[in-house]
Image (spheres, rainbow, N blue to C red):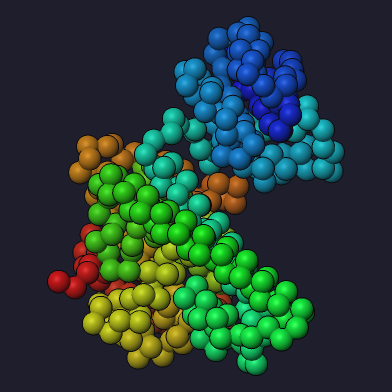
């Protein structure tokens, strides 16, 4: 008998509930999150030789336990919290939350949903994901320090700093400030501490960029050959995607990263709306690539953007069309890299896990219309002519 074991992970404990194929409860257990958690769970689950584990948010609180189970040879599935919440709601009509109910909901979601992703052992992509997150955190910290430094400088110098604040510019400005009293001296001292923080963060960012570049180069990915894709964008994309084989085609990938519009058609009205779904980190990486291409007139990406403007699209619509084109190119590049590395590209569930089992706009780009001024409806002006993804890669190659 095949058994599905759902796990509701927490910082201090993990609750597991086992069900059979008919969703009948077979047992449950709660273990403390410590060094013996794996041993206790495997000992309890030993009564069901044919079993699989479903862990809620296996990339978050359930990360360590999921990786321990995979290393022990167990089959582990990652269940999005939204899927488990839907099961709870449909089962009882409310959202009664307790650990045993949550664990059972996770098991049912894994048993019935076709979009659940199987957890695999970590590989080199996790290194890039780690340093991309570090870069993102440092960038946020730098922004906070710069804002605080600027606020203090505005109290010392009329008008503050008119241009972007750098450590060098702030240091030169502080040297020119004369503290006339104790209050001004305190402000200068505080600004000096913020300046020291800024210098430290800039050094950490530089070191993180170096580590990311090394990690991306070690992956042997050709994503950096695309114009506008540097080590940071490549690290974000490769780290978040992991195995590109889990996307059936470029449309599934576009739905996952939010560059495909959402189909909300009804009857004869064909309507597409701007998608706010998907992985926003990859979407941001694609956005940075698109903006870089648009800023440089010598790139084919800028030519594509100008062509969309000439067709009557707004600047935002043209940028969205370019982002979708770049998404297709990135997908084709990753597939080609996987094949070059003799890694089998298998077909897996597409879309965003926890939203829909299939992409919301499969086939919508580049064959169907882009969003128009209302972001909602159109009948003409396709985003781009039909073409193979491998051919589209030429649009973003660096100019030699």
Query: In which quadrant of the rendered view does residue 186 lie?
Result: bottom right
- Horizontal side of 265 relative to 211 (left or right) equals right
As drawn, 28 above or below 394: above
Query: In which quadrant of the rendered view does residue 198 lie?
Result: bottom right
Q: In which quarter of the image is the C terminus?
A: bottom left
Residue 144 visible somewhere in the drawing: yes
What is the x, y in percent for residue 28?
A: 74, 18
Extreme residue in the left direction: 400
Q: Quadrant of the N terminus?
A: top right
Q: Which of 299 and 32 is in front in this view?
A: 32
- Horizontal side of 22 relative to 198 (left or right) equals right
As drawn, 8 above or below 257: above
Q: Residue at x 52, y 28 (%)?
A: 67
Q: Which of 276 and 140 is in front in this view?
A: 140
What is the x, y in percent for residue 340?
A: 20, 44
Residue 104 visible somewhere in the drawing: no
- Horizontal side of 291 relative to 95 (left or right) equals left
Q: Nearer the viewer, residue 75 or 132?
A: 132
- Horizontal side of 163 relative to 110 (left or right) equals left
Q: Residue at x 66, y 76 (%)?
A: 188
What is the x, y in percent for residue 365?
A: 39, 67
Q: Which residue is drawn at 78% across and 27% down?
A: 100
As drawn, 370 above or below 297: above
What is the x, y in percent for residue 346?
A: 34, 39
């Amino acid at each position: 008998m095949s058994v599905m074991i759902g796990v509701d992970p927490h910082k201090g404990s993990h609750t597991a509930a086992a069900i059979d194929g008919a969703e009948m409860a077979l047992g449950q257990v709660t273990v403390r999150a410590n060094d013996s958690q794996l041993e206790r769970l495997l000992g309890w689950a030993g009564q069901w030789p044919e079993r699989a584990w479903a862990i809620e948010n296996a990339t978050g609180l359930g990360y360590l336990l999921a990786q321990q189970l995979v290393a022990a040879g167990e089959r582990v599935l990652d269940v999005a919290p939204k899927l488990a919440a839907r099961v709870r709601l449909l089962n009882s009509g409310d959202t009664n939350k307790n650990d045993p109910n949550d664990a059972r909901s996770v098991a049912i979601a894994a048993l019935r949903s076709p979009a659940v992703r199987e957890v695999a052992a970590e590989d080199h992509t996790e290194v890039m994901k780690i340093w991309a997150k570090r870069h993102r955190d440092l960038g946020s910290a730098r922004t906070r320090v710069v804002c605080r430094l600027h606020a203090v400088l505005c109290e010392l110098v009329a008008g503050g700093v008119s241009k972007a604040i750098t450590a060098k510019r702030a240091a030169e400005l502080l040297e020119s400030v004369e503290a006339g009293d104790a209050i001004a001296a305190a402000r200068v001292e505080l600004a000096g501490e913020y300046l020291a923080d800024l210098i430290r963060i800039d050094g950490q960012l530089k070191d993180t960029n170096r580590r990311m570049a090394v990690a991306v180069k070690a992956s042997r990915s050709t994503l950096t050959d695309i114009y506008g894709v540097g080590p940071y964008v490549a690290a974000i994309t490769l780290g978040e995607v992991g195995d590109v084989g889990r996307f059936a085609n470029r449309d599934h990938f576009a739905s996952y990263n939010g560059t495909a519009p959402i189909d909300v058609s009804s009857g004869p009205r064909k309507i597409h709306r701007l998608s706010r779904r998907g992985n926003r980190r990859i979407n941001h990486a694609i956005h940075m690539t698109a903006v870089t291409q648009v800023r440089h007139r010598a790139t084919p990406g800028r030519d594509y953007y100008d062509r969309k403007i000439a067709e009557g699209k707004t600047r935002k619509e043209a940028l969205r069309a370019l982002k979708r084109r770049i998404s297709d190119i990135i997908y084709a590049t990753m597939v080609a890299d996987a094949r070059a590395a003799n890694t089998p590209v298998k077909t897996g569930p597409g879309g965003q896990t926890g939203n829909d089992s299939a992409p919301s706009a499969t086939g919508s780009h580049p064959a169907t219309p882009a969003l128009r001024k209302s972001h909602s409806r159109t009948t003409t002006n396709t985003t781009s002519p039909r073409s193979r993804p491998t051919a589209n890669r030429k649009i973003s190659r660096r100019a030699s």
